[in-house]
Structures are given as C-alpha cells and as structure tokens.
C-alpha cells in the first residue's frame, strides 16, 4: 500500500502512548489531528531495545531541546505494546511519546509495512496544518535521519 504523498493531509490516527517525565510514566491516547498548530516528527522504528532503534531514539531524545526550540514534537511509533515502550523509555531515559501501533494500522496507512517482517524505518514531518511536508522511508532500515537533517527540514517549513 502506498503511503501519503508530500503535500497531502497526513493520515490521522489515535494510538495509545507512554511518556516518561521525571521518572513517572504517563499513558494516554495520542491523536495526530489534536496536535495541529506545531510540526510533528513521526519516527517509525522497528523495535524497542534493538541496537539501531536504541541509537535512533536516544539521538532524538538527547536533542529534544533542539526540536522544542523549533516548535516541533517528536513521536516514536513501533508495533510493541505500552509495557515494552515503558521499559524501553525507562532503560534509555527517553522523554518523548512512544506510541504503540500493535495492530499496524498506522504503519499500513503510512505505507511502510513489510508483510511478515514488520515495518521500514521511516520518518515523516507533518506541518502545523496536518500536511505531510517531508518523508524518508528507508529501504533496509539500517540508517536513520539525523537530528540535523530533521532540524533543517523543520526550519524549511517556515518558508512554505
């Protein structure tokens, strides 16, 4: 299934998520359309506590202040459940929302599912109006988008 094209409204979704703050994990639902008004980076990753995903999520978490300074939020999305996400967040001190797409409905809506294997590591930048402005869908998923790349793309939204 093909995902959304640049310039299209991003597929809306509601997923359960967990956020770690000062050692307290808070679980709630996250609905994309309810967070309009600021850019959102959707970082789809294959699995909690895997080497590549840990490196990616830790890189984004350690630079969360840079994303905040640009007015952007980061949401990590993978197929594991909230208990797995909470363990991962606690182990790695991740302080942005980790969303559980256990049924892979959002993965499929964004066109990044790999039948029988999971998902392609992918990053989508949604603007303040809910429009998809940038995406990178990895073929093998070994590399992830750097904070600098994402910051550059978020900055470019001001010129649209």
Image (cartoon, grey):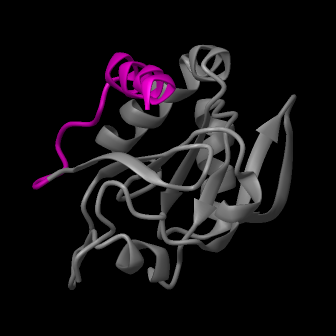
Q: What residue lies at 40% left-to-right and 57% top-to-bottom? A: 47
Labels in figure, total: 0
Q: Nearer the viewer, residue 160 or 154?
A: 160
Q: What residue lies at 44% left-to-right and 80% top-to-bottom? A: 104
Say which quarter of the image contains residue 99.
bottom right
In-image side of 67 versus 27 (left or right) = left
Farthest residue to the left: give it.
139
On the image, the x and y values in percent for residue 128 come to: 62, 43
Q: Quadrant of the N terminus?
A: bottom left
115 is higher (above) or lower (below) than 58: below
Task: State which region is magenta.
Answer: 139-160
Say which quarter of the image contains residue 89.
top right
On the image, the x and y values in percent for residue 10 come to: 48, 64
Q: Quadrant of the C terminus?
A: top left
* Magenta highlight on residue 102: no
On the image, the x and y values in percent for residue 66 come to: 58, 14
61 is higher (above) or lower (below) than 88: above
On the image, the x and y values in percent for residue 40 come to: 57, 43
Q: What residue lies at 18% left-to-right and 51% top-to-bottom? A: 138
153 is higher (above) or lower (below) than 148: below
For the question of whether residue 86 can be seen, the reply is yes
In-image side of 37 versus 43 (left or right) = right
55 is higher (above) or lower (below) than 124: above
In-image side of 90 versus 43 (left or right) = right
For the question of whether residue 31 can be seen, the reply is no
* Magenta highlight on residue 150: yes
Q: Nearer the viewer, residue 63 or 3?
A: 3
Q: What residue lies at 47% left-to-right and 83% top-to-bottom? A: 105
């Amino acid at each position: 299934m093909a995902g959304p094209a640049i310039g299209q409204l991003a597929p809306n979704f509601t997923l359960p998520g967990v956020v770690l703050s000062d050692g307290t994990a808070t679980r709630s639902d996250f609905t994309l359309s309810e967070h309009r008004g600021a850019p959102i980076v959707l970082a789809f990753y294959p699995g909690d506590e895997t080497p590549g995903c840990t490196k990616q999520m830790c890189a984004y978490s350690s630079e969360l202040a840079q994303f905040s300074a640009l007015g952007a939020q980061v949401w990590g999305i993978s197929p594991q459940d909230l208990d797995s996400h909470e363990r991962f967040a606690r182990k790695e001190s991740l302080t942005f929302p980790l969303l559980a797409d256990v049924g892979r409905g959002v993965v499929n809506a964004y066109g990044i599912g790999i039948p029988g294997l999971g998902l392609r590591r992918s990053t989508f930048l949604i603007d303040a109006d809910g429009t998809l402005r940038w995406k990178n869908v990895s073929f093998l998923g070994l590399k992830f988008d750097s904070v600098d790349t994402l910051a550059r793309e978020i900055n470019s939204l001001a010129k649209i």
